[in-house]
Image: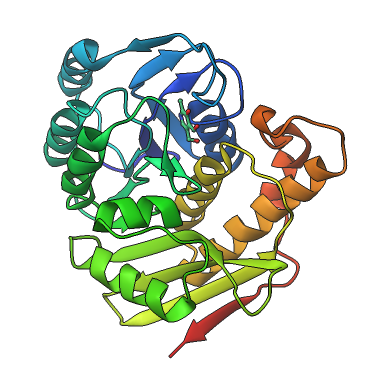
Amino acid sequence: MNKHLVPRVAAIHDLSGYGRASLTVVIPILSSMGIQVCPLPTAVLSSHSGFPGFHMVDLTENMDQMINHWKDMGLSFDAIYSGYLGSSRQVDIVKQFMRDFRKESQLIIVDPVLGDNGKLYSAFGQDMVDEMRRLVEEAHIITPNLTEAAFLLGKEYSPEIDAREITAWARELAGMGPDIVIITSMPERSQPHKTAVLAWNKTDNRMWKVSCDYLPANYPGTGDAFSSVVTGALLQGDSLPIALDRAVHFISMGVRATFGYKHSPADGILLEKVLPYLNAPVPVGSYQLLD
Ligand code: PXL
């Protein structure tokens, strides 16, 4: 029996008790989209690392035994989707997991979680950047934000970067292994009230862009939500540009549902208010094919 009754994803992310990031975002989104999520937690934290004083339990030493049990059970996955790692040593574990559980027509998505707004997250150092470069080689799809793209390529981060240069970055990242590179939080220099997502598919040589309105707030966990919707949409059979449209539209709705309240951005977007929209059709798509 190879075919699962519903698509099944191994989700290799941390569990942060407070702050709507990682597994507390990945699980509700994929479950709402009719996908079975099997978490392989990388760490357990009291909150995401944006809150000072968070307590973290690194699960590096436990992952192999959990994986061995999954092997004994004969489990298989339609997608393997990784995000925030508990230590740079986990890259070897995750790479081996991807090799051991590889199967036909499977999706391997690596969200190379490293940082945002030009800075690494507080728990990470250069070792995580170096190791994440090796994990990216294993993926079909990667979803860095602009900061993570810069770290992976060893380039200077600048919010002023122009679109041409980002397209070159996407191609360069695809040269590291992945078929599809999706770069999020791309500034639109000519339109300061817009932000965009760029995607390069090297298997058909097409570059896509999806723009949306920008609101001046930074919510942790939106990258996790974005990559999760892309993963769910692709597993549902959507094309890449439609998956991007759905993810951009969903995040925009989440930000808009949150922004009007007096609300601390560190608490994340009010995901609970918008989850039902994952099952509604996207009203108007806005993807563009770039030449
Ligand atoms: O959303 C990315 C993320 C995931 N996990 C943890 C984080 C963050 C971002 O701050 O701190 C623990």
Q: Nearer the viewer, residue 205 or 185?
A: 185
Q: Quadrant of residue 88?
A: top left
Q: Nearer the viewer, residue 154 or 84?
A: 154
Q: Residue furthest bottom?
A: 291
Looking at the image, residue 211 lies above or below residue 164: above
Q: What x and y, as percent, mark residue 4?
A: 36, 39
From the viewer's perspective, is 218 left or right of 237?
right
Q: Is residue 239 visible?
A: no
Q: What x and y, as percent, mark residue 103?
A: 18, 47
Q: Quadrant of residue 41?
A: top left
Q: Nearer the viewer, residue 74 or 148?
A: 148
Q: Dividing the image into 4 quarters, which one contains the C terminus?
A: bottom left
Which residue is found at the position 70% from the left and 46% from the top?
A: 217
From the viewer's perspective, is 38 left or right of 216?
left
Q: What x and y, as percent, mark residue 125?
A: 28, 32
Q: Dividing the image into 4 quarters, which one contains the N terminus?
A: top left
Q: Is residue 30 visible?
A: yes
Q: What x and y, as percent, mark residue 248?
A: 61, 59
Looking at the image, residue 245 lies above or below residue 269: below
Colouring mode (rainbow / by chain / secondary structure / one colour): rainbow
From the viewer's perspective, is 255 left or right of 260?
left
Looking at the image, residue 53 lies above or below residue 106: above
